[in-house]
Amino acid sequence: MGKMKHFPPLSSSALFLTLMLVLPTASLNAAVVFSDTFTNSSPDRDAGDSLNGLTTEAGGGTWVGRNAFTFTASGSIIVPLPTPPSGGTETRVMSVASPLLGGQVYTLEADLTAPVNELPADWGAIGFANNPGGTFDSGFYNSPVGQLWMYLAKDGSYGVVAGAGTFLTTGLAGTAPLFNATGFNHLALNYDTSTNIASASINGTSILGGYDLDGLSFTPTISHSGFMFHRVDGAQIDNFSLSATAVPEPARMLLLALGSLGVILRRRRRSWS
């Protein structure tokens, strides 16, 4: 009779490390809530057609806005209409109704170009807003519309804002990471509804990491997600999307982790038998 083989037990530190490797995989993959690449298509997405009232390419949302935005002939981008001849500050906002659910990490992102023929500090933005009526009589910078948003200016300055005017972070002219003054820049804004924590990046580089809004005694009230431009003739936007990743409850995470750990232990047993 052959000698029985035993597999060595995992130490407590090994068990801990194994669980730490398994737990991050317990969360679900991101799911698209809605998205739009603004690709040209007939009969209502041709060059010159208005975006207002159209359905998003994915997710079945409806674009609503204060001002008209039109499709370009190049496809996949839109551009605000020119500033009225009267001049003055002109804010253009477009959004999709998207109340956020608890226990989710939401990512709002888009590609924006810098304004053309405007002041250096004029800007474009993406953000979460509170606007149940969908009329957007004012921009993100006015209460109670603005809830959590980020902007990028023509001069490469930027900021992330909570509410109408609490700056979570700002960057001076020319400091936006990998700033492209003549092309698209990628903006991404993250909000965790389970922890009330916000983060943001520009062109894949973090500009705000894990800001706890509880420290401001502020919890965003969100009815819409959208974008806006402040005096930005010629600015363009592309690849707008909102996605959500579920945050599993602790008990479910533990069950998933223990199940994965059991698989690891069985494999070790086979390898030592």
Image (spheres, rainbow, N blue to C red):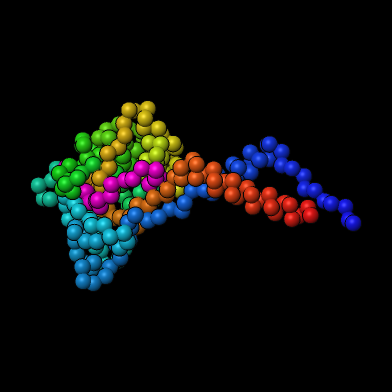
Q: Residue at x 30, y 37 (%)?
A: 220
Q: Is residue 93 left or right of residue 151?
A: left
Q: Nearer the viewer, residue 127 or 171?
A: 127
Which residue is rendered at x = 37% and y = 30% of the image? Answer: 214
Q: Kindly indicate the quadrant of the structure image that contains residue 82.
A: bottom left
From the viewer's perspective, tell me whether residue 23 is left or right of residue 72: right
Q: Nearer the viewer, residue 236 or 62?
A: 62
Residue at (44% x, 36% y) in the render: 210
Left or right, residue 21 beside residue 45: right
Residue drawn at the location 38% of the way across and 36% of the way down: 196
Q: Is residue 133 visible?
A: yes
> Quick check: is 101 in the magenta stretch?
yes
Find out whether residue 160 is within the magenta segment: no
Residue 190 sits in quarter: top left
Q: Give how far across and how far down residue 86 sits, in percent.
A: 9, 47
Q: Which residues are magenta?
A: 89-106
Number of marks: 0
Query: Is residue 23 positioned above or below 44 on the image?
Result: above
